[in-house]
Amino acid sequence: MRGPAYLLALDQGTTSSRAIVFRDDGGVHSMAQQEFAQIYPQPGWVEHDAEAIWQSQLATARQALQQGGLSPADIAGLGITNQRETNLLWHRRTGQPLHHAIVWQDRRTEALCQQLQNQGAEALVQSRTGLRLDPYFSGTKLRWLLDHVPGARARAEAGELAFGTVDSWLIWNLTGGRSHVTDVSNASRTLLFNVHTLNWDPALLRLFRIPAAVLPQVRPSSGVLAETKADLLGAALPIAGVAGDQQAATFGQACFAPGMAKNTYGTGCFMLMNTGRVAVASQHQLITTVAWQGPAPACYALEGSVFMAGATVQWLRDGLQLFQHAHEVEALAGAVEDTGDVYLVPAFAGLGAPDWDGHARGALVGMTRGTTRAHIARAALEAICLQSADVFHAMAHDSGLPLTELRADGGASRNNLLMQMQADVLGVPVIRPTNTETTALGAAFLAGLAVGVWSGADDIADCWQVDRRFEPRAGAAWREAKRARCREAV
């Protein structure tokens, strides 16, 4: 009788690279993590050393195998998930980057985005990509590199350079430069990819002045894309699953049916809702994105971002010094039954969906002499829930699909009070899985499907286990009043 099959997932994030080996029941077998430096050349600019990304990811892969006592022969396939809009430009011959990676948080292309908006390009971009014309996405970052790195544009036009998001950079290195590919979910975050035709769009390449010769081939998210060089991990492994981090987390949460949604509670909140084979155009400033593609046709999602979630708790800790450790917020906020009509609008970095106001700033309103630090702490948690509820309801309106539950993951999902408050504000159950490593798990699931570890969605859904289900306790009238007061504060 054969033993369990193992899958190696590389989870390349904004501040660290991780590698997790999963068993075929979806459980974690072994894990390794390495942080790497953040580079801030000037205000609003964020960069990474491309070599540090690659070396840290390779080191964690080797470490995870070693810690798990596994040989490459035990690994059925390798999956990759990554910080999505961060991008790089490198020499095809030498593999050397021309510049640091420009990170998704980087705002250096704001003037270019404004210029293109003034030219009336927003409608074309939105209709073809489902995205907003914003520095967040990769297309304007690539344009900046071509315009500002000496000789880059001429070399790109001559076919000497390769552009890629982090998944492409890792695959290039894992294959010794043999494969220059990406998947549909990462391609759909570049402003250059038509989400309807699932191809690079010639009109968008002209708009952003991008030579087609630099672009990777686009492949399905689940399927064998390439093989690793044998000497890197001890044997050639099939690279069989690739997806951007939030799409991978949605797959890892087994949100396979239209109307299923997950919310990742991290520094910010990222909510994605499966819309099936329909690329729904949002009327509420949400993003339309490709969720994944396997042997079946592409699956789409609506996405909404809340900029400040865990970061709001960090502000209470570091800015207001209300407590010493982030986890203490739960007990402090639980010391009062409500916020005493205090509302926090945590627009410290502007507002995300559905408001999209980069110029908005934070506000704390409704305070009286009776307001305590406990009320402020509870108002902060409530703000995370109320902002997420705005996105949740916008998704329901845009898609016409009833949202009957929300699956939660990310570090802050361990806060039971926050999860209960979220259920109360939404009026639907919030479900936290046993395994909250859903991003890496999604990459493993995509790879496992391609190499036959799992036969289909039902097989994978059996691996997804509930840790706790938070049922709403509040009534509809309370919810409506809460949301109305929150909108007044905004």
Image (cartoon, rainbow, N blue to C red):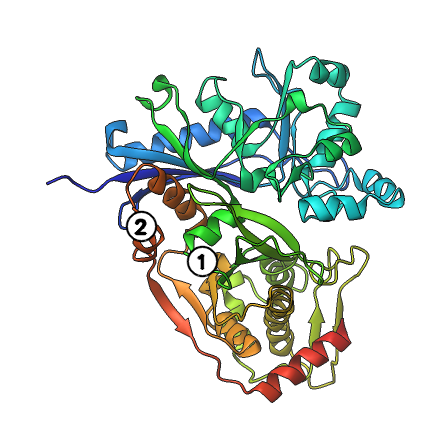
Name which quarter of the figure residue 184 lies in: top right
Q: Are marks 2 and 1 in contact (CB under 8 Å)?
A: no
SS state under label 1: loop
* Depth check, front residue: 407 or 122: 122
Q: Nearer the viewer, mark 2 or mark 1?
A: 1
SS state under label 2: loop
Name which quarter of the figure residue 305 lies in: bottom right
Q: Is residue 172 above or below residue 262?
A: above
Q: Quadrant of the C terminus?
A: bottom right
Residue type at tag 2 = Gly
Q: Residue furthest left?
A: 1
Q: Position of residue 68 (x, y in %)?
A: 27, 37
Numbered circle sitting on residue 255: 1
User: Residue, x 51% and y 46% (percent of image)?
Assistant: 298
Asked if residue 268 can be seen in this view, the reply is: no
Q: Point out the tag, 2 or 1, that comes first from the N-terminus.
A: 2
Residue type at tag 1 = Cys
Q: Label 2 crowding class (10 Å Cα cut-off): few <14, some 14-19, many 20+?
A: many
* Depth check, front residue: 151 or 458: 458
Q: Quadrant of the N terminus?
A: top left
Numbered circle sitting on residue 26: 2
Total number of numbered discs in the rendering? 2
User: Residue, x 50% and y 23% (percent of image)?
Assistant: 172
User: Residue, x 46% and y 74% (percent of image)?
Assistant: 429
Q: Position of residue 191 (x, y in %)?
A: 69, 40
Q: Position of residue 321 (x, y in %)?
A: 63, 64
* Depth check, front residue: 382 or 441: 441
Name which quarter of the figure residue 482 lies in: bottom right
Q: Label 1 crowding class (10 Å Cα cut-off): few <14, some 14-19, many 20+?
A: many
Q: Is residue 93 above or below residue 410?
A: above
Q: Position of residue 285 (x, y in %)?
A: 71, 59
